[in-house]
Image: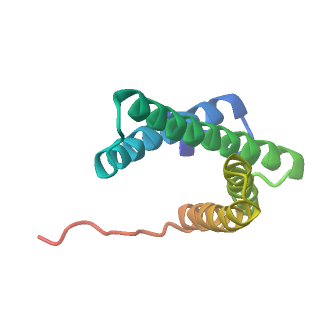
Amino acid sequence: MGYWDIPEGTDCVEKTWIATKLATALGLVGSAYHIVAFQPDSAVAALQRATNSTVTMAAMGAIFGMTTCLSAQAREAPDDPLNYFIGGCASGIFLGARTHSAITGTSACLGLGTLAFFTKVGKMEGWKLAGPPKL
């Protein structure tokens, strides 16, 4: 079962687990690219960099999944895109705390919240980023 198959505001643990797994995979891929692009001095430094990036992304995924689901339950508006904005913003605030930067947290809150909001709106309205191939 996928993230979008579970009704909003229900089974928060499962939705959080799915979001965490996806964010962890994105963190692994991103850290691999970062290690290739900016090669560290040692294998230990590479491992530390990969671990730091992956754990940060996993935590952001978990925060997004849990905040979105709990917001849907608390507001009693399960399909409201504002829940996704709140979840994205909470993830951005965590990123700001992790980097010890209020500017990073504020901009990540607005950026990730807006991205999540429009992702939910697009899903509800059936937006397509790319159509079927033209043959």
Q: Is residue 129 above or below residue 80?
A: below
For the C terminus, give its image quadrant. Answer: bottom left
53 with respect to 42 (left or right): right
Quarter of the image for residue 93 reads: bottom right
From the top left corner, tell me how far across and down residue 48 is, in percent. Answer: 48, 32
122 with respect to 63 (left or right): left
- In the depicted view, which residue is nearer to us: 10 or 99? 99
Q: Is residue 120 visible?
A: yes
Which residue is at a point 73% across and 37% down the rendered structure image? 10
- In the depicted view, which residue is nearer to us: 26 or 104? 104
Q: Is residue 47 above or below residue 133?
A: above
Q: Is residue 92 above or below residue 20?
A: below
Which residue is at a point 35% across and 43% down the rendered structure image? 35
79 with respect to 35 (left or right): right
The extreme bottom residue here reads 134
Quarter of the image for residue 6 reads: top right
- In the depicted view, which residue is nearer to us: 91 or 37? 37
Q: Is residue 11 visible?
A: no
9 with respect to 122 (left or right): right
From the top left corner, tell me how far across and down residue 100 is, in percent. Answer: 73, 52
From the top left corner, tell me how far across and down residue 4 is, in percent. Answer: 55, 46
